[in-house]
């Protein structure tokens, strides 16, 4: 009951936005819940996905779903708090953020992602929040790219720039 999966319409829209940015990429599904976003990315050709969730029942569900979809060989599932994981030094091409609403975790995760610079050049962060949430701008080389609204839900897309200068 604590897990609030992304709705079908929002998930379909999210993957439409990034459809050409998935294949061969390293993905982080932070606050993974059921793991549906990372699993969808793997099914669309992502090279690898790391799933992080603090709840043991969510971790078991993700592992079961990966096994059912025959995607476990390209996945790592970790139980623990999401924010400390951002200090691991790993780099990702695509990051999904869908923490529990109104906890401050999304804003803190965004600040930590930029602060620890966990995205590779041209990396993408997809953040799901309530439509009325005001998410922070991020320090360079990160920038807010675009926001999409779907009823009471908003998807915010951030990009990490490369070495264009």
Image (cartoon, grey):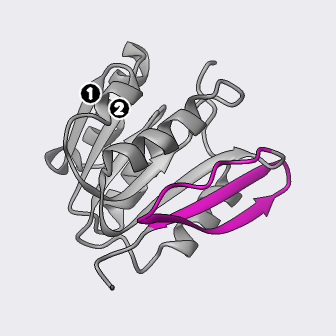
At a point 48% along the width and 37% down the height, the residue shown is 109
Left or right: residue 122 versus residue 12 is left
Q: Secondary structure at mark 2?
A: strand
Q: Which residue is mark 1?
A: 78
At a point 72% along the width and 27% down the height, the residue shown is 102
Spot occupied by residue 3 in the image (x, y as percentages of width and height): 58, 26
Q: Quadrant where the C terminus lies? A: bottom left
Q: Is residue 135 above or below residue 119?
A: above
Which segment did they paint magenta?
133-159
| CB-based contact (under 8 Å), mark 2 and mark 1 | yes
Disc with the residue nearer the chain's start (2 vs 1) = 2
Spot occupied by residue 146 in the image (x, y as percentages of width and height): 65, 70
Left or right: residue 65 versus residue 4 is left
Spot occupied by residue 71 in the image (x, y as percentages of width and height): 24, 50
Within 10 Å of the Cα at label 2, are there few (<14), some (14-19), or many (20+) other Cα atoms?
Answer: many
At a point 41% along the width and 65% down the height, the residue shown is 141
Q: Which residue is mark 2?
A: 52
Tell me if residue 150 is in the magenta stretch: yes
């Amino acid at each position: 009951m604590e897990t609030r999966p992304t709705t079908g319409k929002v998930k379909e829209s999210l993957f439409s936005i990034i459809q050409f940015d998935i294949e061969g990429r390293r993905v982080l599904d932070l606050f993974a819940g059921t793991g549906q976003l990372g699993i969808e990315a793997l099914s669309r050709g992502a090279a690898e996905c790391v799933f992080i969730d603090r709840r043991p029942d969510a971790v078991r569900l993700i592992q079961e779903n990966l096994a059912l979809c025959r995607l476990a060989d390209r996945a790592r599932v970790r139980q623990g708090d999401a924010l400390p994981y951002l200090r691991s030094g790993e780099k990702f091409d695509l990051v999904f953020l869908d923490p529990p609403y109104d906890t401050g975790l999304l804003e803190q995760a965004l600040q930590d992602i930029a602060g620890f610079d966990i995205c590779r050049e041209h990396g993408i962060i997809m953040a799901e929040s309530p439509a009325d949430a005001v998410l922070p701008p991020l320090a360079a080389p990160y920038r807010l790219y675009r926001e999409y609204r779907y009823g009471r839900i908003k998807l915010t897309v951030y990009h990490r720039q490369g070495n264009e200068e």
